[in-house]
Amino acid sequence: MWGWVSIVIGYLLGSISFSFLAGKWLKGIDIRQHGSGNAGATNTLRVLGKGPGIAVLLLDMLKGIAAVWIGYALGGGDPLVQVLAGMSVIVGHNWPVFFGFRGGKGIATTIGVMATLAFLPSLYAGIAAIAAIAITRYVSLGSLLFTALLPILLAVMGKPVEILALSLLLFAFAWFRHRSNIVKLLKGQENKLGGRRQL
């Protein structure tokens, strides 16, 4: 029963949209109506600036970390409960019940979840993603690379099957949520990091 409780808590925790709240508190706007229309750290950076963008990134990551630890505590260390709690916080971030089910794309929260479940594979994938962003200035490309590398690294490093299964699901999740970005990348029309603020 406590495992199910951790899943519900994870979803509700994920549903706290720090990007939306930052837009409301700092500028009195719905950030989903500005920039890319996404309630996430990258759009917060573009619309509100570096400070709010970094704060939202860290808070979204902390949501993922907290959800996994709640799953660990309530599930008695059962890896499946931790994985389900991690999945639920990402679902909450993407489709938040408190904000009309219109959230972000879940990458920062995914990083928090996966870094807690499998630190080294997430670190290696993260380094590759950061390098890609630094070279191309495409955040979406780094995000896609991160989720694509994780299942490979998890399999190579022999991590539990529950975590590998989650990484494959998150890979599909992320690529579906970034489908418009993929089209823009292929057409050379994707926005680069460091572009002019949208507000």
Image (cartoon, rainbow, N blue to C red):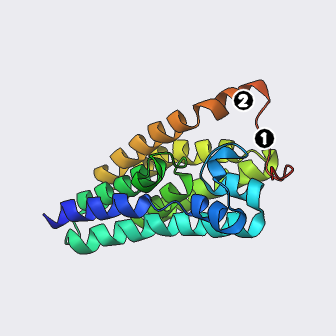
Residue highlighted by disc 2: 184
Residue highlighted by disc 1: 191
| Residue drawn at x 31%, y 64% as measured from the top left | 9
Question: Quick one: label 1 or label 2, which is nearer the N terminus?
Answer: 2
* 177 horizontally vs 196: left or right: left
In the rendered image, residue 190, in percent from the top left (x then y), is placed at: 76, 36
| Residue drawn at x 46%, y 66% as measured from the top left | 63
Q: Nearer the viewer, residue 116 or 5?
A: 5
Quadrant location, the N terminus: bottom left
Q: Answer yes or no: is residue 136 visible.
A: yes
Q: Amino acid at mark 1?
A: Asn
Mark 1 and mark 2 residues within 8 Å of each other at the beta carbon: yes
| Residue drawn at x 53%, y 65% as measured from the top left | 61
Residue 14 against residue 106 in the figure, above or below: below
Q: Nearer the viewer, residue 131 or 179?
A: 179
In the rendered image, residue 30, in percent from the top left (x then y), is placed at: 63, 53
